Image: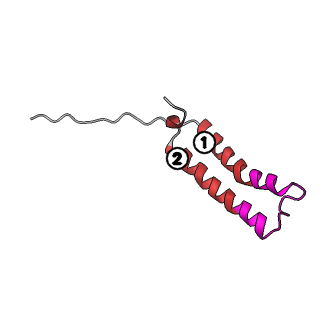
Amino acid sequence: MSFWSQIEAKVMSATFASFVASLLLAILNATVASSQLMGGLPAWLQFLLVTFAPSLATFLSGYAAKHTAKPPVVTRMHRP
């Protein structure tokens, strides 16, 4: 069983959404704010931090979260 097959779809989608939001913030920081949002850090490091740090935090917290077990499904047997 591969690593990626163990990850739930909700964790992957939350991570992707976080990445897109972070990417938009990084682009905004680089263009509109003239890279002053994070002060003295180099622009390339600001881009990496803003883009990947939230995505990584979202992924790790979603992956480590305990999941509620689903109750067993009760089915009826039909007689012919």
Q: What range is drawn magenta here?
A: 25-49
For this view, does 34 lie left or right of residue 9?
right
Coordinates of residue 70 in the picture (x, y in percent): 43, 37
Q: Amino acid at mark 2?
A: Lys
What sort of colour scheme is used for the picture?
A: secondary structure
Q: Nearer the viewer, residue 72 or 31?
A: 31
**N-terminal-most mark, 2 or 1:** 2
Task: Identify residue for label 2.
Answer: 10
Q: Tag 2, which secondary structure? A: helix
Task: Identify residue for label 1.
Answer: 62
Coordinates of residue 42 in the picture (x, y in percent): 86, 55
Coordinates of residue 30 in the picture (x, y in percent): 78, 64
Q: Do callouts 2 and 1 mark residues in contact (Cβ within 8 Å)?
A: yes
The quarter of the rendered structure image containing the C terminus is top left
Give the Cα distance between marks 2 and 1. Answer: 8 Å
Q: Residue 25 lies in what quarter of the image?
A: bottom right
